[in-house]
Image (tube, rainbow, N blue to C red):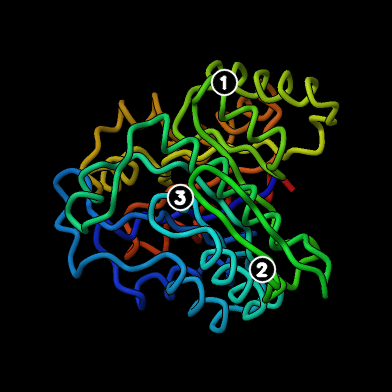
Amino acid sequence: MDFRIFTEPQQGASYDDLLRVARAAEDAGYDAFFRSDHYLKMGSASGLPGPTDAWVTLAGLARETKRVRLGTLMTAATFRYPGPLAIQVAQVDQMSGGRVEFGLGAGWFEAEHRNYGIPFPDVAERFDRYAEQLAVITGLWRTPAGETFSFDGEHYQLTDSPALPKPVQAGGPPVLIGGHGAKRTPALAARYAAEFNLPFADPATAVRQFERVEAACAEIGRDAKEIVRSAALVLCLGRDDAEVARRAAVIGREVDELRANGLAGTVAEVVDKLGAWREQTGISRVYLQVLDLDDLDHLELVAAEVLPQFR
């Protein structure tokens, strides 16, 4: 099983904080460092010193890490035009030597759009734009060198684009799609995704959504086994119950709630829960949502005690 660190810097983190965690993740043997793509804090967190842009962050990390893969859960399609976004991601892929993975979602957090002057269409239009962005971005990356790309959609039109620059990874970085939508999300995953991610769900919910993706793949004649199954779960691990409780208090969560909804508890508890997740859902990758970015011992504990039992 692949283990990846997933951060929520809108809750309060500078670039230097993220760099420290990314390097710690790399040194500890994790497969990847991911971050959210948000411009506004959620809940009671201060959010200070303020938001950092996902792709500016990943560009910096591309030059300051060597091995870990880098990406977003998920880039918001509402934030950027698809042509410039394809250029940004391709450039970061070049800067990293081909270590980028591209998570794209429709966008959902209305308040951050309002606060920063970003249009926020209704959900149907957001998904229409999302689908067109996937078509444009992957189309630009996959256009053979020396040829041009055109697209005539309802929301985006491109005419004779040189489709440059090209990412290092042939055909472009792996595309991640995720979420709980019952119809359009699985259909888009079947068409575009290298990986499908279920965030903050229980195994039964994950199984149902993975089955929808399988059915969507069958409709278009794609082998569903080509799509990696993954989950994102909040992390709260301790050597004993007291350490679990201390870590839960720091992130403002209750231990019982975390045990019910995330990866919380002692090493034995978390290993058992991950084993059950893998057996029930077929996931081969997990994103550990780390909410206290100052607690690098947390990452090291997982790397020392949990990762070896799944490799």
> Which of the two labelled residues, at mark 2 and mark 1, occupies the earlier sequence position?
2
Q: Amino acid at mark 2?
A: Ser
Q: Which of the two residues, 204 or 224, is positioned nearer the viewer here?
A: 224
Residue sitting at x 67%, y 73%: 67
Q: Amino acid at mark 1?
A: Lys
Residue furthest to the bottom: 63
* Separation (CA) of disc 3 from disc 2: 20 Å
Question: Which residue does the numbered mark 3 point to in the structure image?
Answer: 77
Residue sitting at x 39%, y 41%: 240
CB atoms of marks 2 and 1 within 8 Å? no
Task: Check residue 161 in the rendering and tell me which mark sits there, or answer none.
Answer: 2
Q: Judging from the image, what secondary structure is the residue with disc 3 in?
A: loop
Q: Nearer the viewer, mark 3 or mark 2?
A: 2
Question: Which residue does the numbered mark 1 point to in the structure image?
Answer: 183
The image shows residue 162 at horizontal and vertical percentages of 70, 73
Q: Which of the two residues, 148 or 26, is positioned nearer the viewer here?
A: 148
